[in-house]
Amino acid sequence: MKQIPMRAMAASVACISLLAGCGDMNVRKYLPFGGDTTPERSRTPANATEYQCAAGKRFYVRALDGGDAVWLILPEREVRLAKLGTAAGHYSNGIAVLEISGNEAKLSDGAAAFTGCKTAKAAGE
């Protein structure tokens, strides 16, 4: 039977003792993808209003040119809509038509229609 040198045994005991002290340490904060300390970023585009509609649909609207146009942000694309005449809250690009009245909106985009749309704040009330 081979005998372990005293220095090797002392080094092993020291390493085990040091590792045991790390047991209550939060290792997740040192892992690049495992930590949950990073807050989730907002999915709402900057300076945009979110509208939640019937059937779980949603879109975002950002005012442009002092209200003379809006940037419509849909899940699959983004388009610019110009204000229609002097009517407040009516915008179109010849295909999509957006009507905004207070906290409610209606959007028709060709065959697709977004109805029952309310701002996220109004929908949560």
Image (cartoon, rainbow, N blue to C red):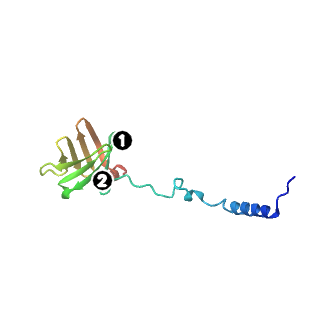
**Residue at 33% in and 54% down:** 45
Of residues 93 and 125, the one nearer the viewer is 93
**Most extreme residue toward the left, as rendered?**
85
**Residue at 51% in and 53% down:** 33
68 relative to 15 in the view: left or right: left
Q: Which residue is mark 1?
A: 56
Indicate the quadrant where residue 66 lies: bottom left
Disc 1 from disc 2: Cα separation: 16 Å
Query: In the structure shown, which secondary structural element does the residue marked by tag 1 occupy?
Result: helix
Q: Position of residue 111 (x, y in %)?
A: 24, 35
Of the numbered discs 1 and 2, the one sitting upstream in the chain is: 2
Q: Which residue is mark 2?
A: 49
Query: Residue flagged by tag 1: what amino acid is it?
Result: Gly
Query: Residue flagged by tag 2: what amino acid is it?
Result: Thr
Query: In the structure shown, which secondary structural element does the residue marked by tag 2 occupy?
Result: strand
Of residues 80 and 50, the one nearer the viewer is 80
**Most extreme residue toward the right, as rendered?**
1
**Residue at 72% in and 62% down:** 15
Q: Few, some or many C-alpha atoms within 10 Å of disc 2 (few <14, some 14-19, many ≥20)?
A: many
Indicate the quadrant where residue 28 lies: bottom right
**Residue at 29% in and 44% down:** 77
